Amino acid sequence: MVKIMKTKTTKLACAVATSALLGAIFLAPAQAAFAKSWSFSEDSVSLGLKGVSPHVQKTSKGDRLWRSDMVPTGTAVTMCDNSGNCIQETFSTGSAGPVSDFTIAKAQSGWRAYFKSTDSSSQKIMSAPCTTDECLSFGTAVLTSTDMVVSKDQKAWGVPDAVTLPDGRVRIYIVESDMSSRTSCPESVASYISSDGISFTKETGWRLTGGYVDTEILSTKKNNWVMIVADGPGCGGSKDSRKPQQLYITTSKNGLKWATPKVLTKTDAGRLDPTGYEVKANTYRIYFAEGSITDNNYSIKRATLRLK
């Protein structure tokens, strides 16, 4: 879950000719990628889980869910069956202490955990090797990159999404603040790349701008990447900061350039921190946090995302 930071809006004047040129170069391909439409429907199950920043891993026993919760480890883990019945599992972070925004990805050396760790002065993205196949415990944690360390007071930062690329490398998508944007929605999505899943280097440019947060890669198929995201209050096309957060869908051919996200959900409730996996062709199971940013009371929900 990203803590939203707002800055005073500054309107930048742009030349009409330049705008038209950029639209011709960048917007046309993005719009073309959305010739298809999506449907998002909440499943009629009651998981009985509280918290934010869920991460799901499909297993032979069901869906294993890590989520940031007020427990000693900072993250709780449950196994949920297809009917939505969830059983808590034992989770150990060892010497890493409390962690949040947990995610895992398979590196060349095996499965690794990625998470946010906070101390008295900073918050940083760490990784550690999973010591069990289920990744219910992990070994010594190391820093992913000196670029993924910020002050503990910095907002609009974090929620890493680690994903294994088709060539075996690991990429982390993460929300940062682009203060040079001079907008009320500086939240932007950056990415870092690693050949071994341990040491990461920042990639050039932004993956998304305009206040989109909480990324989750659902598919890395050739020329058909799919990502679900949330927006920050007053972002994602809305100028009303009171509007509940919504979920959006976007696609890409290479995981670097993404189409303009299209909204999936209504504003009847705040929805954020999506995670999920492909159930079958063009159908995805999604877990997300639902609640209000005003009272910080969130529950984990489940939904089905389909390509029409």
Image: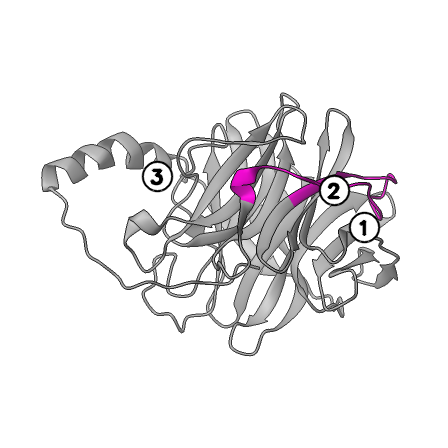
Q: Which residues are magenta?
A: 126-148
**Coordinates of residue 172 in the picture (x, y in percent):** 58, 38
* The stretch drawn in magenta includes residue 128: yes
Residues at badges 1 and 2 in contact (C-beta under 8 Å)? Answer: yes
Majority secondary structure of the magenta segment? loop
Cβ atoms under marks 1 and 3 closer than 8 Å = no
Q: Position of residue 113 (x, y in %)?
A: 73, 42
Image disc number at residue 141: 2
Q: CA distance from mark 2 to mark 3?
A: 41 Å
Residue 199 — which label?
Answer: none
Mark 3 packing: few (<14 Cα in 10 Å), some, or many (20+)? few
Q: CA distance from mark 1 to mark 3?
A: 47 Å
Where residue 44 sits, quadrant-wise, is bottom right
Position of residue 210 measured from the top left corner of the image (x, y, whole percent): 36, 51
Which residue is disc 1 drawn over? 95
**Horizontal and vertical percent for residue 147?**
52, 40
The one of 247 and 147 positioned closer to us in this rendering: 147
Given this view, does label 1 or label 3 mark the residue nearer the observer? Answer: 1
First reached walking from the N terminus: tag 1 or tag 3: 3
**Which residue is located at x 52 percent, y 31 percent?**
224
Amino acid carrying label 1: it is: Ser
Which quadrant, please, contains the N terminus? bottom right
Q: Earlier in the sequence, mark 1 or mark 2?
A: 1
